[in-house]
């Protein structure tokens, strides 16, 4: 989709996890090598675009803290230079490029779940919805109580399984109430969590990342 808009895109195979899982569960020093790795791999690029709002939140909000914890002034300076160039996909398109119509075609009934990191940490606002409203053929329906967390929260879903399952049940109920075929969002973690709940309930609703919808064209179907 980005290439369709005229951009040169590279996927560096040397990349690894951003370290958020380690950092948020108390293994902050163990995350520092992953911070260094991210900086080394992505430093040469003008812009870094991620399909995960939580990963972008980690880089922009918590990498400076990790660099400070490492006591490495050089790493801190490199993080400060790189972090502003790291974007979640929808904010890159709408806020950086000023693009709301990417030429997509997706003839399905779709509802959108705004993930916690995109909503509360990155504050992408309605950028994903602006993009979805310009997709040809789409039937976009509002999700009730959309801003409620799905219950994943990284290891929260493991450490507080009963609470997480209750939150997921509420989210799935609201998704089903829309009559949507597809629930889309901008975080793979939430896609996995909600998708698992919908599959176990044999709901007949698929979870699809926003990028997949935006990449779809009339020619490809």
Image: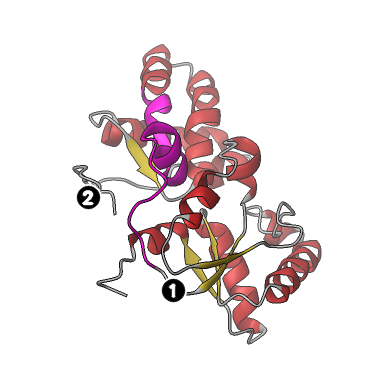
> Crowding near pointer 1: few (<14 within 10 Å), some, many (20+)?
some
What residue would you read off at disc 1? 107
- Which of the labelled discs sits on residue 122, or is there none? none
- Which of the labelled discs sits on residue 3, or is there none? 2
> Crowding near pointer 2: few (<14 within 10 Å), some, many (20+)?
few
Where in the figure is residue 173, as x and y percent of width and height?
A: 75, 73
- The mark that comes first in sequence, 1 or 2, is 2
Q: How is the image coloured?
A: secondary structure
Judged from the image, the secondary structure of the residue bearing numbered disc 2 is: loop
Where in the figure is residue 74, as x and y percent of width and height?
A: 36, 14
- 89 or 55: nearer the viewer: 89
Residue 25 seen by the camera: no
Judged from the image, the secondary structure of the residue bearing numbered disc 1 is: loop
- 44 or 118: nearer the viewer: 118
Looking at the rendered image, the disc whose residue lies closer to the viewer, 1 or 2, is 1
Q: Is residue 198 magenta?
A: no
> Does residue 105 appear left or right of residue 26 in this picture?
left
Q: Magenta residues, as a range?
A: 82-105
Task: Name which residue lies at 67% across and 84% down.
Answer: 201
């Amino acid at each position: 989709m980005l290439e369709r808009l005229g951009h040169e895109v590279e996927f560096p195979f040397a990349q690894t996890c951003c370290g958020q899982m380690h950092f948020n569960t108390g293994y902050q020093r163990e995350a520092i090598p992953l911070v260094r790795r991210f900086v080394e791999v992505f430093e040469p690029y003008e812009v870094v675009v991620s399909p995960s709002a939580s990963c972008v939140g980690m880089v922009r909000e918590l990498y400076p803290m990790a660099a400070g914890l490492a006591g490495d002034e050089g790493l801190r300076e490199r993080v400060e230079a790189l972090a502003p160039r790291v974007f979640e996909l929808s904010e890159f398109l709408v806020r950086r490029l000023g693009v709301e119509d990417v030429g997509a075609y997706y003839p399905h009934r779709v509802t959108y779940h705004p993930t916690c990191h995109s909503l509360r940490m990155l504050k992408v606002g309605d950028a994903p919805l602006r993009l979805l409203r310009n997709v040809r053929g789409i039937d976009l329906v509002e999700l009730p109580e959309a801003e409620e967390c799905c219950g994943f929260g990284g290891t929260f879903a493991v450490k507080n399984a009963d609470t997480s399952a209750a939150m997921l049940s509420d989210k799935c109920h609201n998704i089903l109430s829309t009559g949507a075929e597809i629930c889309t969002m901008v975080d793979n973690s939430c896609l996995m969590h909600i998708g698992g709940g919908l599959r176990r309930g044999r709901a007949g609703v698929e979870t699809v990342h926003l990028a997949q919808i935006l990449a779809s064209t009339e020619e490809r179907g």
